[in-house]
């Protein structure tokens, strides 16, 4: 297949908190797996991080952003094959973000689940920034700047890709055909990894900061990760029994195991039916800590080589800008602001 015939992919992760295995399974591993097949544009969403000031104030955000960039590389994103960049290094995101904000009805933004939940936490009346409301219109700009065919994300981001599709259609209807309407891609299994301490709640960066046994961070010490898995909530039974409905915590452990070993539920059934929970947890801890060890060793080499990292940051931004600036100019022309 020539590179022109390849489908284009765009995705990113907000730079708040440390990445966990949910981010790896739901998002990053999909990007790594499809590098040969697709033309990837992957980025660190640092402008989006500003919408949650309490997550970033006083925390040296740029260092965090570069840590995530290095982690993408350590997880196996190949900067030769994928264009990897930081959102704020490509100014076109903020510019197109404004155009998108102007065509997005406020009522669409107010209906978004993330705004309703994070807005409540931050308490809209106490002065939360308008960026939290406009988060999806900036995300639409991130996506539409690159004319991607596919946006691979975890399940919680589905609504953001759906609103992007609606915004693209609305812009096209108002100003003429300008943007491609992309499709969302979610893993069949692993699109929503649950918290180890509470299998009814999605594993998330913000909860991980409050509850130590909730998530496994990609940079967490291996012994801490093993302990968190061994303590994961299951149910009051003693072992895995496929003839009954499995508890959510057991299903979650099986899903993690299958995603890390590329095996199916059928194979898990053969391996774990009748096994004690201790056996299942040990097996999950083994595969997870093996993967973390590999990622962490690469991460330290990458983070230690500042010169190469700086070059990769600059090169990724330049490659992204080449595409983004053409699209932004097209959008400006469509609105009539430019000839
Ligand atoms: P978080 O909710 O932990 O802050 P983000 O919202 O920044 O994570 O998500 C980054 C990417 O990782 C998105 O594609 C998101 O859908 C995916 N993701 C986040 N949490 C999970 C999870 N628990 N399971 C699967 N995918 C996830
Ligand atoms: N909202 C995504 C998250 O929470 C990050 C993100 C920003 C994104 N822009 C995007 C994801 C565009 C996919 C496509 O992690």
Image (cartoon, rainbow, N blue to C red):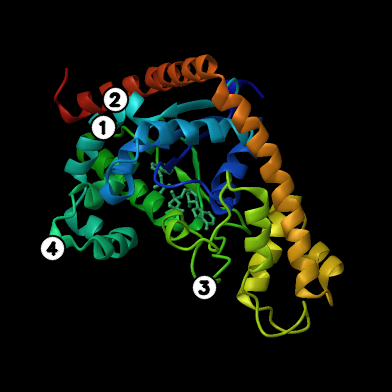
Point out the tag, 3 or 4, that comes first from the N-terminus: 4
Left or right of 17: which side holds 119? Answer: left
Q: Earlier in the sequence, mark 2 or mark 4?
A: 2
| Image quadrant where residue 339 sits | top left
Q: Position of residue 28 (x, y in %)?
A: 57, 42
Residue under label 1: 94
Callout 2 crowding tier (Cα within 10 Å): few <14, some 14–19, many ≥20: some
**Label 1 residue SS:** helix
Viewer-closest of 153 and 237: 237
Frontmost of labels 2 and 3 is: 3
200 on left or right of 258: left
- The answer to whether 253 is drawn above or below residue 28 in the figure is below
Q: Is residue 77 left or right of residue 168?
A: right
Q: Quadrant of residue 195?
A: bottom right
**How many numbered markers are drawn?**
4
Q: Where residue 232 appears, x then y in whole percent? A: 63, 69
Q: Which residue is mark 3?
A: 200
Contact (CB < 8 A) between labels 1 and 3? no
Q: On the image, numbered disc 4 is attached to which residue?
A: 125
Q: Which residue is painted at 58% across and 28% down in the image?
A: 6
State whether residue 321 is above or below residue 73.
above
Left/right of residue 291 with respect to residue 221 in the rendered view: right
Q: Which residue is mark 2?
A: 91
The earlier-in-sequence mark between 1 and 3 is 1
């Amino acid at each position: 297949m020539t590179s022109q015939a390849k489908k284009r992919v765009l995705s990113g992760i907000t730079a708040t908190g440390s990445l966990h295995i949910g981010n790896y399974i739901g998002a990053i591993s999909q990007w790594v797996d499809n590098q040969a097949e697709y033309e990837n544009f992957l980025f660190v969403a640092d402008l989006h991080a500003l919408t949650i000031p309490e997550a970033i104030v006083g925390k040296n955000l740029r260092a965090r952003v570069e840590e995530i960039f290095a982690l993408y590389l350590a997880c196996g994103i190949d900067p030769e094959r994928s264009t990897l960049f930081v959102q704020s290094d490509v100014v076109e995101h903020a510019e197109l973000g404004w155009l998108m904000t102007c065509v997005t009805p406020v009522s669409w933004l107010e209906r978004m689940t993330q705004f309703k939940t994070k807005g409540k936490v931050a308490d809209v009346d106490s002065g939360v920034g308008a960026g939290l409301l406009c988060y999806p219109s900036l995300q639409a700009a991130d996506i539409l700047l690159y004319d991607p065919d596919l946006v691979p994300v975890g399940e919680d981001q589905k609504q953001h890709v759906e609103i992007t599709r609606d915004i693209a259609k609305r812009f096209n209807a108002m100003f003429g055909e300008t943007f491609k309407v992309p499709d969302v891609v979610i893993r069949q299994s692993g699109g929503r990894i649950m918290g180890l301490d509470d299998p009814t709640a999605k594993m998330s960066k913000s909860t991980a900061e409050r509850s130590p046994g909730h998530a496994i961070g990609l940079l967490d010490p291996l012994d801490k990760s093993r302990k968190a898995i061994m303590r994961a909530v299951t149910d009051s039974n003693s072992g895995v029994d496929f003839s009954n409905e499995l508890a959510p915590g057991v299903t979650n452990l099986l899903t993690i195991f299958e995603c890390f070993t590329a095996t199916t539920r059928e194979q898990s059934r053969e391996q774990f039916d009748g096994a004690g929970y201790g056996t299942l947890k040990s097996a999950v801890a083994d595969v997870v800590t093996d993967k973390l060890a590999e990622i962490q060793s690469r991460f330290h080499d990458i983070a230690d080589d500042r010169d190469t990292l700086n070059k990769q940051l600059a090169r990724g931004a330049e490659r992204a800008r080449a595409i983004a600036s053409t699209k932004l100019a097209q959008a400006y022309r469509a609105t009539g602001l430019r000839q």
